[in-house]
Image (cartoon, rainbow, N blue to C red):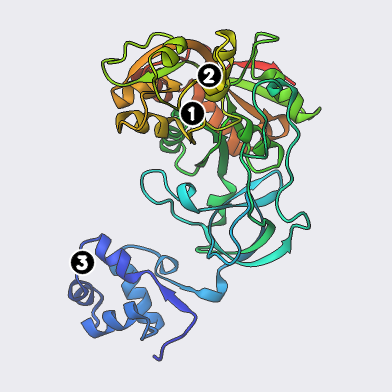
Amino acid sequence: MKQDSDLRNNLKSIRTRLGMSQQDLANIANVTRQTISGVESGQYAPSVAITLRLAKALGCQVEDLFWLERDLPEIEAVLAKPVPNGQQLRVSMARVGGQWIAYPLIGKDAFRQDMIPADGEAVAVVRQSSLGGFPQEELPKGLKGISKLSNRNGEGTSQTGTNKVRVRLLDDNLDTLHNTVVIAGCAPVISLWARATERWHPQLRVQYNFANSMAALHSLCRGEAHIAGMHLYDPETGEYNTPFVRDVLAGREAVLITLGVWEEGLLLKSGNPMGIKTVTDLVAGGATIVNREIGSGSRMLLEQTLQKEQIPFDAVQGFNNILKSHQDVAQAIVGGVADAGMSTASVATAFGLGFIPLHQSRYDLVIFKKYLEEAPVQQLLSTLGHRMVHSQFEILGGYDISKIGEVVATV
């Protein structure tokens, strides 16, 4: 049969995954090797009989092998962040608050260690923002006097944003997209929690979008995430996280659930060759640091500590050298780019670095009450009491999980 330009197949990938050659498959399916080659290259559309024999030989459904390109759904979605104009756009997808959200897989957002598979490709802009980008947010009062939050991620942007796109999905498995829970946060243990949960609930997918505490909270407010993780301390009230949540949520109902309490402090080179014990020693010894971006809990802690010690920010070498994650800070110290940086005890252990504890910070999960009724969110939260999750945290070290899963505030 002649080629059908809309017919697509997955024959080669399934065959090779099973360790079969074209001839092996041809022998089992009682066809010629040339038939297998023609189907895999898209030059030959097999008959119904051959299609059924191929599926039986590979132990799968016909739908796993063949599909029509025009049958793949296209859906309208809201972009989670601005993107460069004209760039081919891979996206991952989730349904949050009754609407589809498309998360661009660009730059570091496209990777964890391996590249993240896409759910679809943005094929057309539906509506362009009349603002020429995303609006800046007002500075919550809990951050006043600490740092100015210049925009949604704590940094300037000159990109023109589009806020709606049409996305062509790469497969028709909408159930996976509906069963996706999106968490925005910066705690490395979120990925451990996510993977353990997916093992316990194989139909659930957890999408972890890296964001500092304030950026995660704003992502929740914009309807881009089900859960925001944060670790911010307000010295005026002595409270963790709740004052910031009240400011940003502006009356919307949410709960704060504790993930754990972690030790925060100074990461140092292994063996602490400069003999650093306090932030004052950073200045006295001429140490170079790397800092985190505005809106992160680590930067806030550094600034609060410097203010308490009456040390001007510009007296610290490298104060304006900004990195975007706990891992990046650790890697800069390991690589000799810096002598110190602010992070957590667990990150220090993972990278074999020295650590000076400065503060114990509670890491909370912020969730709108309306999301608590959704089955995927319930499945994820239910695993906070599971031993498989606890063991991952315990072996990592640097976390007190005695209160994990407890509701610590309602706003």
Which residue appears at 57% of the width and 36% of the height? Answer: 184
Q: Position of residue 124 (x, y in %)?
A: 64, 68
Q: CA distance from mark 1 to mark 3?
A: 52 Å
Q: CB of mark 1 within 8 Å of CB of mark 3?
A: no
- SS type, badge 3: loop
Q: Nearer the viewer, mark 1 or mark 3?
A: 1
User: Callout 3: 10 Å neighbours few (<14), some, many (20+)?
Assistant: some
The residue labelled by disc 1 is 291
Secondary structure state at the residue bearing disc 2: helix
| Residue at image location 50% in from the left, 23% down from the top | 384
Give the residue at mark 2: 302
Rendered position, 58 above or below 346: below
Is 22 above or below relative to 348? below
Residue 218 sits in which quadrant?
top right
Which residue, given by chain and number where applicable, does mark 3 sit on? 20
Q: Is residue 264 above or below residue 245?
A: above
Estimate how packed mark 2 is, as few (under 14), some (14 to 19) or many (20 or more) residues with alpha carbons within 10 Å.
many
Query: CB atoms at circles 2 and 3 under 8 Å apart?
Result: no
Expressed as whole percent of the image width and height from the top left, the position of residue 386 reads: 45, 23
Asked if the residues shown at circle 2 and circle 1 are in contact, with their CB atoms under 8 angstroms apart, the answer is yes
Between disc 2 and disc 3, the foreground one is 2
Circle nearer the N terminus (2, 3): 3
